[in-house]
Image (cartoon, rainbow, N blue to C red):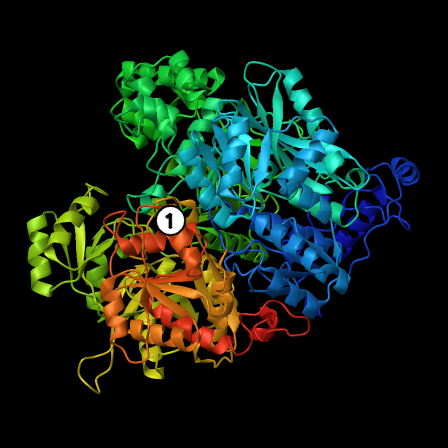
Amino acid sequence: MGFPPLAASCRSLGRHLGWSARSLRSFHVFSPRFSPVPTPIARAVADPIVGYTPKDGEHVLNSPSELARKISAKVLPKLPRPDVQKVLIVGSGGLSIGQAGEFDYSGSQALKALREEGVDAVLINPNIATWQTSHELASEVYFLPITADYVAYVLEKERPDGILLTFGGQSALNVGIQLDRMGVLERLGVQVLGTPIRTLEVSEDRDLFVQALKEIDIPVAQSTAVSSVKDALSAAEKIGYPVILRSAYALGGLGSGFANDPDELRDLAAKSLSLSPQVLIERSMKGWKELEYEVVRDAADNTIICCNMENFDPLGIHTGESIVVAPSQTLPDDQYHMLRTAALKVIRHLGVVGECNIQYALSPHSMEYCVIEVNARLSRSSALASKATGYPLAYTAAKIALGHTLPELPNAVTKTTTACFEPSLDYIVTKIPKWDLAKFSSQVDRHIGSSMKSVGEVMAIGRTFEESLQKAIRQIDPRYKGFEAYVKPEDLDDALTNPTDTRLFAIAYAMFHKNYTVDQLHDLTKIDKWFLYKLDNIVQTVYALKTAGSIENLDKEIIERAKKQGFSDSYIADLVSSSEDAIRAHRKSFGITPFVKRIDTLAAEYPAHTNYLYTTYNASEHDIEFDEHGTMVLGSGVYRIGSSVEFDWCAVTCARQLRQMGNKTIMVNYNPETVSTDFDEADRLYFEELGFERVMDIYELEQARGVVVSVGGQLPQNIALRLKHNNVNVLGTDPEKIDSAEDRHKFSSILDSIGVDQPEWTEVTSVDAAKEFARRVGYPVLIRPSYVLSGAAMNVVYEEAALDYNLSAAADVSPLHPVVLTKFIDNAQEIDVDAVAHKGRLLVHAVSEHVENAGVHSGDATLVLPPFSLSESEMARLKEIAQKVAAAFEISGPFNMQIIRKDSDVEGQESQLKVIECNLRASRSFPFVSKVLGQNFVEIASAAIADQNVPEPVDLMAQKRDYVCIKVPQFSWTRLPGADPFLGCEMASTGEVASFGKDIHEAYWAALLSTTGFKVPSAQSGILIGGDVTQPEMRYVVEGLQDLGFKLYCSSREVEEFFNDLPYVSVKRIFFPTKDKRKLREVFDEYDIQCVINLAKSRATSATDEDYVARRNAVDFGLPLINNARCAKLFVESLGKKIPQGGLRRYREGRIPSEVRSWREFVGKRA
């Protein structure tokens, strides 16, 4: 970057004085306009941090004092730094329950650290929606499976000097251990950086772990490692019931649970041993406190505790499923230090180099404690601790892996102190998990325990527990207003003792409606009384507000008390029968507004100039001046089904692009797993709610230039119109237009006016009107509520009886909105169009084709780009529709359309193209199309939104490409006991992966193998076939599999008769127990069934339905399940092409498959 002379001299002076270059915030300095040389793009990347250049092997204290640096160079131990020029980072793959966006954040931090050190970074991660898979961070990116075989091929092709295994969750760790055992790392001379393999093995293998801790007299939960059901039962006899069973080498408690008797243990062990080779039987300590310490250690044995956290829920609930507070609130000093000392001892003994976390169980009645586990890698808790303290754990861990020690690294927040310090907090952080269990069939078990089921988490910052908790509750779901009884359990005591995802609201119900005391609740829940008394404070304030009764009776004192306890204006309004706007005005008339405070890692004990901010009512002054007047970018909030890491990519890209165009930026988001909540991505980061009240507070305080609402998914869109009505400058497409695209009536009449076709539809308020419409247009019809995210309560019905049943389910969703019925077009193809326009003129567009027929939610569909079956005339018609829609809605910014294509019944006539949905915002496929086409759609959209440097239109779809990319959904069925693995209009996937290939089959093969846990069936193994035999693809699939040498089995007579009537096909019907899981497992083993293809027409209605049992047990036994006919056909075609090329064989040296090419090699440029 070219610097004006003044800036350059400032920097050299800064280096002379020992300031870190980073503290000068170089990315605000722009090159002069007259510069004769073209200047490289200014990226918002931090500068290298170390000021003083050490001589050979010296380690130098990061200090402004020249003397201190010189002395430290002599005193600090001389450690050789690893000599690495190129390093491979192993990512974590698609987002799944237990392994989500936190690894995008930690991997991005590690890549940033490598870049600062001048190390060439190569990344393997098939998750195309992440920020880390951008060329801003890695020099080469491979969208390939995270398996030992594929990572070995990439190592062979790239020949790096080093590998980092601790930034990609459990997937990366397991692959690293496998590669070591295969001898690949040694043969290729690849050095494992950071924590050594042996330490990883010890922390993962239960027996070794227990032995290691016994050596230093640290108590561990008494446990026995077993590898058969029989051994599990005898171990439990010795330990005594109840016991907890855990899987080794598993993530997020997968396959673990509690057993109170031998029968429960038998079922649990059978399932767990199908997912993991070894399980552990341990004494159960349900009801003890659970605590976590995040520890950082460098190679010179400097060790610090970055953060300690306490679970609100007692032991027995996985820490990823618990409400967590930081710092711990109920520990006396002696217990805190006892556990801190033990943590330091354990980490040193295990030899961790970098970051890890240690989990404890602590008896509530004595000083007895034991270690539950150590994660010798970055984890979900590490991301939470980084955001809770402002200490960048992943970044520091990567620097340590490259040979730096803590004293020489600066504190990245203050820029002046060193990283060898323990953060102190003058606030309290609360994390609450986000479950989306209601999205799944009614069979799903909603109890929470030792295995994770949550899809995301929120983090709220406040200065009292009450404030921070109520903020967090609102972040979970915009429908929640605070600590309130949102559920009314029939058996309240059971709901309190055996927690579900709504236990917090069951506690509220007990306190508000059943007058349970703190002691009663403590006996039932085992939650520490400190927390329960805090909840009671909220209850008392609710009663005080109800007693006031009306807005006129609310004095300054009561409003102040409520706001300090985290009450929202709208919650207060409900309690005094008023409106949110009236309460807001009343509150401001008393001068009660929030204060903005900094997170500076030092509890304000040392001057710090950080941009990491939160708001609170428990303060008396602001920590910052409001003189930047930046542009606000609203993030996407909590990861949930339908809104995930892809929107974080959009928000980060937009903020960076706005900065690059010379604008100050303000990011608002509250998700600790994201890159957007990293403090060096924007000029100011507010770790805050995304509701109307808080966005208005920040907008008014900052006097912001404008607000971007179209890059954060649905949450910012929901408040866009209200912001406009309150005189907020909403940038980009007019919120009135956004509303007309969300409202079916307005949307439909606009489409009619521009001559764009759509399926027939109507809006009904009664069942009779619905039946009348269905008879007129003919079944099937699609039912949906008016406002919808990711297909909530959408269903296709094929007959009147189903219409009756489904309307009662869908009508409950939004009683204020009537239900919309649409004619469903059977056997039609679905197409996604992602586009960007400026003032109604189309700038770029991408057309992706779904493999599945319409009826599968677009978030669960397999997307192909460039499209494989559309003619040039259809492509031209699709572009014309995009142009008409852009003009009609006067779009400035991103938009997305779903279009149905159906061949005409009349020969020679063109196909029908009907628009079924249009969102005037970035969609989940924006990162996918940007990376596949090598053109960043969000950068163009940001220019259009800001109305700055808008590029000329370009038709990317007219360019011919010699590659294909396929995006495949990542499901987490294994995590959700009872859920039916069936694809419909309701979105069910938790993430996505994508891979490139020279053709559709190569790309699909790599993408399918990239889904976490996919095991290719071995040659001549058995495949279980079932479902709807009338599907035209069924015959092709069966004949194809038989020709490839697989043995075919089925469970129903109907399927057997259908196939055995076909020439040269033999499918054997087998005994199929639908109620006994253990017997079924034996049947699968007997016939060597390694894959299930089940093409049912509709979701099962009972738990003994044969198709449901086949689908459910495929995922429970860890087998690949193909549940869509078009995908099954593509799978068989891909198998047919890959088997002759050795697709079923394991890794062999020197035989690199053709799909092992980097993103740059496929696209032909560093996109």
Query: From this viewpoint, is residue 356 visible?
Result: no
Is residue 183 shown above or below 237? below
Q: Nearer the viewer, residue 438 or 29?
A: 438
Residue 798 location, quadrant: bottom left
In the image, taking residue 435 as reference, residue 216 lies left or right, namely right
Is residue 316 shown above or below 998? above
For the point 37% across and 51% down, the residue is 1080
Q: Quadrant of the C terminus?
A: bottom right
Q: Quadrant of the N terminus?
A: bottom right
Q: Nearer the viewer, residue 692 or 5?
A: 692
Residue 184 location, quadrant: bottom right
Q: Position of residue 969 (x, y in %)?
A: 42, 59
Q: Position of residue 1095 (x, y in %)?
A: 30, 63
Q: Which residue is mark 1?
A: 1079
Residue 85 location, quadrant: bottom right
For the point 34% across and 72% down, the residue is 1038
Query: From this viewpoint, is residue 902 visible?
Result: yes
